[in-house]
């Protein structure tokens, strides 16, 4: 289910002009799964979980660390929770990409 959500979210974000990348940071376990670059250049982080998945202590630490620096981090486990991220992407698309 998590892989299906990840694939669907990537497709939806790309339709809205976003860059959707896997985030791997050697030496920094627990970083969010994905980085999304929005139209206009804003960067957000996405942690994907299954409906029953929980954050590890390391993931919670890394997310808090990013948020303390002002980064936006979305924790998503279903399409309903993805709504806020997609709404933000649509707004950025309308501002920067729409004719």
Image: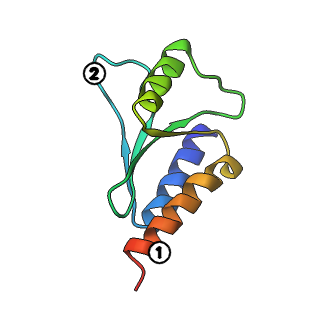
Q: Which residue is mark 1?
A: 94
Front-most of residues 9 and 18: 18
Percent position (x, y) of residue 71? Answer: 42, 38
Taking 25 as reference, is 98 left or right?
Answer: right
Q: Is residue 74 above or below residue 11?
A: above
Q: Quadrant of the N terminus?
A: top right
Front-most of residues 79 and 41: 41
Q: Nearer the viewer, mark 2 or mark 1?
A: 1
Front-most of residues 76 and 94: 94
The dot on residue 26 is: 2
Taking 13 as reference, is 40 left or right?
Answer: left
Residue at the (44%, 70%) spot, across then down:
93
Residue at the (55%, 13%) spot, across then down:
57
Percent position (x, y) of residue 83? Answer: 64, 55
Crowding around mark 1 (Cα neighbors within 10 Å: few <14, some 14 to 19, many 20+) is some
Taking 23 as reference, is 80 left or right?
Answer: right
Crowding around mark 2 (Cα neighbors within 10 Å: few <14, some 14 to 19, many 20+) is few
For marks 2 and 1, the one nearer the N-term is 2
- Kindly state the secondary structure of the residue where label 2 is placed: loop
How much space separates mark 2 and mark 1, taking CA atoms?
A: 35 Å
Percent position (x, y) of residue 23? Answer: 36, 36
């Amino acid at each position: 289910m998590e892989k299906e959500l990840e694939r669907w979210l990537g497709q939806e974000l790309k339709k809205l002009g976003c860059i959707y990348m896997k985030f791997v940071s050697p030496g920094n376990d627990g970083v969010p799964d994905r980085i999304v670059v929005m139209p206009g250049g804003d960067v957000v982080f996405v942690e994907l979980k299954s409906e029953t998945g929980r954050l590890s202590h390391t993931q919670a630490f890394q997310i808090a660390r990013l948020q303390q620096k002002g980064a936006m981090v979305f924790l998503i486990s279903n399409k309903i929770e993805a709504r806020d991220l997609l709404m933000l992407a649509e707004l950025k698309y309308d501002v920067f990409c729409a004719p």
